[in-house]
Amino acid sequence: MKVVIDTNVLVSEVLRDRDPEAVILFVLEQDDFTWIVSEDILIEYRSVLARKRLGIPDLIQQRWLQLIGSLTSIVSVDQTISFPRDPKDAKFLACALSAKAEFLITGDRDFSEAQRLLSTTILSVSQFKRLVYAGYS
């Protein structure tokens, strides 16, 4: 199953661990799950992890960027989505649509309005844990 992970889930994992960490590790450990990214998503991951106000040490940023680089699958985005509610989030929707991803995991409530735009199931971290992760345990 193809999974797109919003930047806020990644940052939450890097800063706080707990549920986001469990979800990311679950996706990475399952042979039938693939963490899908686009070039635009990778750029956002790098940019957000480097934000000074987050205070993420360079070594941790580098470690995560190496993991992301080696453990994700990059897709070519051939779709354009208009998402006026939050245009910067359109890249996640376009990636999910282009990859025909089964899941988009996010902590952003803006995406609830996007569900009508694609067949990908949009879930929060806790919903993913309850509905998908728990079924594999």
Image (cartoon, rainbow, N blue to C red):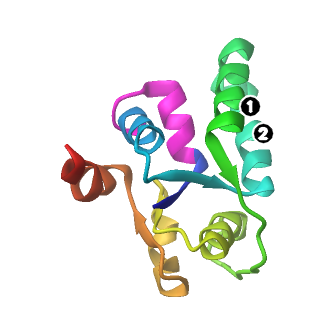
Q: Residue furthest bottom?
A: 116
Secondary structure found at label 2: helix
Q: Amino acid at mark 2?
A: Ser
Please provide the residue range marked out in magenta. Answer: 8-20
Q: Amino acid at mark 1?
A: Arg
Relative vertical location of residue 57 with respect to residue 114 in this rendering, above or below = above
- Image x and y of residue 3, in percent: 51, 58
Mark 2 residue crowding within 10 angstroms, few (<14) / some (14–19) / many (20+): few
Give the residue at x 42% y 33%. 21
Tag 2 and tag 1, C-beta contact below 8 Å:
yes
Q: Nearer the viewer, residue 4 or 30?
A: 30
Residue at image mark 2: 47
Percent across and percent down for residue 105 are 46, 56
Tag in front: 2 or 1: 2
* SS under mark 1: loop
Q: Residue at x 53, y 52 (%)?
A: 34
Task: Indicate the quadrant containing the C terminus: top left, top right, bottom left or bottom right.
Answer: top left
**Residue at the spot 76% in from the left edge and 29% down from the top edge:** 50
Asked if residue 47 lies in the magenta stretch, the reply is no
Q: Position of residue 18 (x, y in %)?
A: 34, 30
Let me know if residue 10 is in the magenta part: yes
Distance in Å between CA atoms under marks 2 and 1: 7 Å
Q: Main secondary structure of the magenta part?
A: helix
Seen in the image, is 27 located left or right of residue 90?
left
Q: Residue 63, percent across and down?
A: 67, 20
Q: Mark 1, residues whose alpha carbon is within 10 Å: few (<14), some, or many (≥20)?
A: few
Per the rendering, the mark at residue 64 is none
Q: Which residue is mark 1?
A: 51
